[in-house]
Image (cartoon, rainbow, N blue to C red):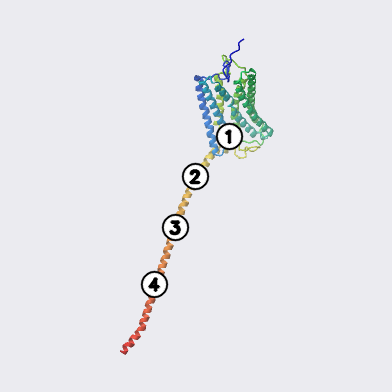
Amino acid sequence: MAQAPKPPGPPYVNPNIASIGGRPTVDQDVPVCAVLIAIYLTGAIANLTINLRNRRKGHKFPLSMAMFGFCMSRVGTHVLRLALATRPRNIRLAMAALIFTNIGVLVVYIVLLLLALRVFRATHPKLGWNRPLGRAFTVSYVLLLCAVLLVVAFTILSFYTLDPKLKSVALWVQRGAILYMMLFNVASLVLLLLSALLPREPDNENFGTGSMESKLIILGVAIFFIIFIAGFRTGTSWSPPRPASHPAWFDSKPAFYVILFSFEIIIVYLLLFTRFDKRFWVPNGSKRPGDYSRIGLDDATAEKSSDQDRTSEQTKVSVQDKDSVKGKESLKDDESVKDQEEVKDKESVYESVQEKNSIRDEELVHDKESLQDRESVHDKELLPGKESVEDKV
C-alpha cells in the first residue's frame, strides 16, 4: 500500500479539518476586520487618554493601561487576520493569528477578577482580606500564566509535527489549559455572587464613586459576557474536529466574530462609559480592612470629585494670577519707593549745598563788617594827628 504524500512544511496544516472562523477571505473578512480594528483602536485611545489625565491629577489606576494593552492586542489580532485573508497559504501567519486570538482575552480575565475581588473585600472585609484567600489568588495568577505558556507552546508544536501521538498530547494540553481559563472566570462569578448574596459585615465599606449596587450590576454584566466567551472557547476546544466540508455552527464566521469579539467590545465600552477608573478605584497600598475607605469619601462627595478637581484647577489658576498681579504691584511699589528715596537724597544734597552757601555768605559779610570796623578805627586814630599838625602849622 502506497504511503500518503507528505504535506509541504513545516509548519504543517490540514486543510480538510474545519477551524473556528473558517479561512479568512477578502470579500467577507477584510471589511469586518477593518471595522473591528477601528473599534478596538478607539477603545485603546480612550483608555490611554483617561489614564494620562488621571496621572496628571495623581489618580493611579493601572487597569486602564491593562485595557489599553488588551485593545491594542486585538488590533494586532485583526491585522494578522486581515493579512491572512490576502495570503491564505502563509501558514506561519495563520499560526500567529491563532495564537493572538487565543491569548489576547486573558487581560480581561484578570481585570474582571481583580474588580470582583475588590467588591468582595469591600462587602466582606474579614473574608476578603483573609491571607489564605489572597495566597490562593496569587497561585491562580501563576497558574494562568502557565496555562498561557502551555497554549502557546503546544499550539506551535501542533503546527511543526506530523506525529499523531505528539498531536494528541498537544491537543489535550491545550484543552486542559483552556478549561483552567474557564474555571478562572468562574472564580470571578463566585466572588460576585458571594458579595451580593451573603449578608454584609458590619464593617463593610464602599470605594470609588457610585453605590455598591451599581458596581455589582456593572460587574455582573461584564462577567456574564466573559464567561460566555470562555465557555464558547472551552466547548469548541473539547468538541471533536469536524471536516471542512461539513463544519459545525460554532465554526462559522458569524459565531466567531459575534461571540468572541462583539462580546469583548461590549465589555470594553461598558467599563469605559461607566468610568470604571473612578468607580472601582481604591487607595494605593490597600492591604487590610478599612483601607478602601481611609480617604473618607462618601458617595455624594466622591461623585463630585471630578468637579472639585476642576474647581481646584481654576482656583490654582486664579491664585497664580493674583500672585502675578501682587508681584507686579510690589514691583511698582518698590520702584516708587526707590524714586522717593532718590528724590529725598537729591533734596538733602541740595539743602546741604544751600546751607554751605549761606554759611559762606555769612562769613563773607562778617569779614566785610570786620574790615569796615578796622578801617573806621584806623581813621579815628589818624584824625587827632591831622588836627595837631594843622594846629602847628
Left or right of 380 on screen, residue 330: right
Q: Nearer the observer, disc 2 or disc 1?
A: 1
Q: Quadrant of residue 186?
A: top right
Dot 2 amino acid type: Ser
What's the CA distance linking mark 1 and mark 3? 61 Å
For label 4, the residue is 364
Along the line of sight, the residue nearer the viewer: 42 or 204: 42
Relative to 193, say whether 293 is above or below: below
Dot 3 amino acid type: Gln
Residue 155 at x, y percent in the picture: 60, 22
For label 2, the residue is 318
Residue lying furthest front in this view? 2
Residue lying furthest left in this view? 393
The kind of secondary structure element at disc 1 is helix
Residue in view at x 36 percent, y 79 percent: 375
Dot 1 amino acid type: Pro
What's the CA distance linking mark 2 and mark 1? 32 Å
Dot 4 amino acid type: Leu
Q: Nearer the observer, disc 2 or disc 3?
A: 3
Crowd rating for badge 1 (residues with CA inside 10 Å; few <14, some 14–19, many 20+)? some
Residue in view at x 49 percent, y 44 percent: 318
For label 1, the residue is 62
The kind of secondary structure element at disc 3 is helix
For label 3, the residue is 340
Of the image marks 1 and 3, the number of the one nearer the N terminus:
1
Residue 162 at x, y percent in the picture: 61, 18
Of the image marks 1 and 4, the number of the one nearer the N terminus:
1
The kind of secondary structure element at disc 4 is helix
Of the 4 image quadrants, the one containing the C terminus is bottom left
Return the mark for residue 272. none
Residue 319 at x, y percent in the picture: 50, 45
Of the image marks 2 and 3, the number of the one nearer the N terminus:
2
